[in-house]
Amino acid sequence: MDTPVTFIVGDLMSEDEFFRFCQMNDTLNLERDSEGNIIFMSPAGMLSDSFNGDIFAEFAAWLRKNKVPGKAFGPSAGFTLPNGAVRSPDVAWVNRTSWDAMSRDEQERFGHVCPDFVIEIRSRSDSLRYLQDKMQEYLDNGCRLGWLIDRYKEKVYVYEPGCAIRQYDSLDIQLSGEPLFPGFVLNLAEIEK
């Protein structure tokens, strides 16, 4: 597995310029690290994206059914974290208060907010170490719960602030959304891998 290609630009590109660059190159999957460097991400394969879509659908349906206030996002949404990085997790959720605190213009861009909840799903081209570093970055910037799902090694890592990372050595498990989402359980065993 490879690490993504990083274009070292440092602070040569402002936040607005990076947003415009992404809009002009909308066929590319781009992120930006806290140093301002641009990261070129490989698109997911069809099986990985289908797996991601099934997880997003389960989560979004549960949020709707339980009328949980906030916004859910798929892999094309960009978030500007407090450290300045722009990240696009595979699945994300932002609470209603944080969402409402942003202006409409900011909501149309890579809003300045760290998702409360993120899921990263390892694609064949993803380096596990790179994704683990991203998960830690989310936590360091205010994320309250994160799941890293490694389909290839059949492992799941659960991240919570102030807690040791929990590792499960199977995808035939149920992941609990507690304490952030009381009652939410994602049964990975039921999702086609």
Image (cartoon, rainbow, N blue to C red):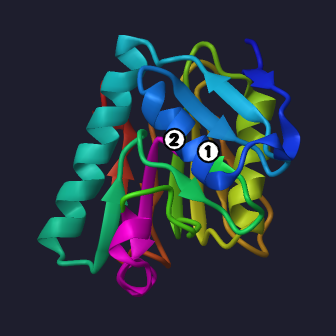
Horizontal arrangement in the rendering, residue 142 relative to residue 109 (left or right): right
Residue kind at label 2, given as amino acid type: Arg
Residue 29, given in percent of the width and then of the height, sits at 52, 27
Quarter holding the N terminus? top right
Q: Quadrant of residue 150?
A: top right
Residue contact at pointers 2 and 1, CB within 8 angstroms = yes
Up-down relation of residue 1 to residue 103 (above or below): above
Residue at image position (43%, 40%) is 75
State how far apart marks 2 and 1 are (Cα). Answer: 5 Å
Q: Which residues are magenta?
A: 87-107
Up-down relation of residue 14 to residue 9 (above or below): below
Look at the image and say whether residue 134 sits in the magenta stretch: no
Residue 97, given in percent of the width and then of the height, sits at 40, 87
Horizontal arrangement in the rendering, residue 65 relative to residue 46 (left or right): left
Residue 108, given in percent of the width and then of the height, sits at 36, 59
Residue at mark 1: 17
Look at the image and say whether residue 103 sits in the magenta stretch: yes
Residue kind at label 1, given as amino acid type: Glu
Residue at image position (43%, 12%) is 45
* Nearer the observer, 108 or 65: 108
- Can residue 87 be spotted in the picture? no
Residue at mark 2: 20
Q: Quadrant of residue 26?
A: top left
* Nearer the observer, 108 or 143: 108
